[in-house]
Image (tube, coloured by chain):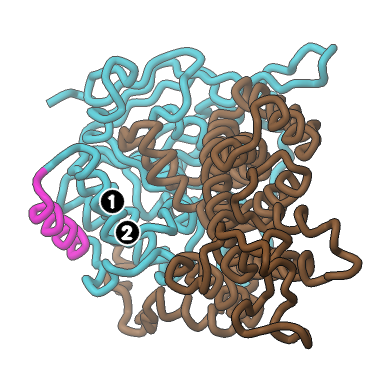
Chain colours: A cyan, B brown
Amino acid sequence: MSEYALELSNLSRHFYLKNGAFKEPTLLKAVDGISLRIRPGETLGLVGESGCGKSTLAKMILGLLEPTNGDVLINDKARGSSSRLSMSRQLQPIFQDPYSSLNPRKTIEQIIRLPLQLHKIGDAKSQQKAVKDISDLVGLPERLLKNYPGQLSGGQRQRVAIARALILKPSILVCDEPTSALDVSVQAQILNLLMDLKKELGLTYLFISHNLGVVEHLVDRVAVMYRGKIVEQGTREQIFQNAQHPYTQALLSSVLTPEPALGLPEVLDSSTWDKAS
Amino acid sequence: MSDSTSTVSTAPSANTFLPVVPEWRRMMNRFLGHRGLLMGSIILGLIVVLAILAPWLAPHDPYLQNISQRMIPPVWHEKGSWEHIFGTDKLGRDYLSRLLYGARISLTIGLSAALISGLIGTTLGVLAGYFGGRVDAVISYIITTRLAMPVVLVALAMSALVGGSLQMVIILLGLLLWDRFAVVARSTTQQLRDAEFIASAKVLGASTTYILVRELLPNILSALIVVMTLEMAHAILLEATLSFLGLGVQPPMPSWGLMISEGKAYMFFKTWVIAIPGIALMVLVLAINLVGDGLRDMNAPEGRN
């Protein structure tokens, strides 16, 4: 077994923003030299504000975007060195929006079965059985298998997405804000399901979120991302009880609480940590 | 994991049950509720059946000339007879029989031209929409070039060059009418290109061909079918135009456009010779357009119940 399930070394992705035909394009460093290591069985939470490069990072890990610099190592193998097909057996995504992550023209069974068909695993019968087993595992009633995604609720759809991700038995899941499109009550269901699956299957998670409450509930370690860089990382306790970086402190103080007496949180001025970083 | 949330079960609650109405049932209800679509489908279906059964339904041979029986008026005319319900033309051929066989030609040309142009247009549009960048620039240029050409003029020039025949007309129209397919396929593909189910298939290692044909195409097909009906009507009208001008289907084939053309010398005194094929053409094109509009309404989100 490799020491790290997922290792990012000095990963960068730059975009050039066009400013018309005659002006120099502006360089945008969406992800700027990020190094991260996740041990097998560990859950790493990646937090940061919108537009800080979280999703760009996820896309590079999934192989949907080529990095400008640096490497993604999955179980000690470089992402670029093997095909998407073989990589997808080790690493699977769960996307943010269960309304766009399922093909509306396919039945739930076809959607969950697709990975097996693409990887040519088993015959039709064993594939059908595998679909039923995995649906059981994620709490998806069997009667829904013949339905189309449009007939399912958001929570059910996200269960379908999780079933599809798990059917190849990957060891790593990259969850890109898997609950932000769901109702609060359904969020808890899905998060508990993810945790149960982790215990049962020994999965490794990279959990990308801007919801600190969710992150605190789930993860072992936290990495805080700001403007394409990791500004602070540490164990859950270190970050939530003793944050060092001013941006992390601001992020933590901006969490909304249900207690009415506290009112709206005061958010610090960004100039404080822009100087610091 | 903290204990505070362990009371929330991971199983969905019992009331998440949704009444499952079969897809075909809902489509059927929508279909029957749309008057235009229903009427269009009935008329179009009738014309298709009549065209297919033409050899059995036609009372006479559509090519058989009989000079002694020329220019007999239709049955509702005082000099008409049940022998020739729609009368005869200047060569004494039975008009009803020619009309029935003419429907075959119109439908064949409409369907084949729409299929050929659909294939060309969809391929170009999907490639442009999916890959974007330079591919899109090149294909968009081709689309613009095609849009800049007046269809009738090019069709006339080409058929004058290569000569008119049924096959020629089909190929010509097929090569000319793909622009709307390309434009629609391109824009719908652009909307879906970044959808997460496409990304998911990519991560799974699906080939680009698989993604385009199996994941993307079924999602844009409904829009393309609507375009197809419209282009079919367009092709049928263009065939009539070309045949009317003598550059399309050649005599003695019973094309509706040709029938109008052959009758134009008599139009002031024997109006039925152009009125009958003219009305037939209008009804067919109207029916196809009604079907197209109806299909579009059925696929539009606001039409969903």
| Residue that protrudes farthest toward the right in the picture | B268
Chief secondary structure of the magenta span? helix
Instruction: Find residue A130 and report its horizontal and vertical position in percent.
Output: 13, 55
Instruction: Find residue B109 and report its horizontal and vertical position in percent.
Output: 57, 49
Instruction: Find residue B33 and report its horizontal and vertical position in percent.
Output: 58, 84
Helix, strand or loop at label 2? It is helix
The residue that appears at 68% across and 59% down in the rendered structure is B91
Q: CA distance from mark 2 to mark 1?
A: 6 Å
Q: Quadrant of the C terminus of chain B?
A: bottom right
Q: Which mark is residue A160?
A: 2
Q: Is residue B9 left or right of residue B94?
A: left
Task: Look at the picture and state if A213 lies above or below A6.
Answer: below
- Foreground pick, B14 / B192: B192
Whether the residues at callouts 2 and 1 have beta carbons within 8 Å, the answer is yes
The quadrant in which residue B169 appears is top right
Q: Which mark is residue B189?
A: none
Residue B74 in view of the camera: yes
Q: Is residue B120 left or right of residue B154?
A: left
Which residue corresponds to mark 1?
A164
Write down the region rendered in magenta. A122-137
Amino acid tagged 2: Val
Q: Is residue B72 left or right of residue A215?
A: right
Task: Look at the picture and state if A74 lies above or below B278.
Answer: above
The quadrant in which residue B132 appears is top right
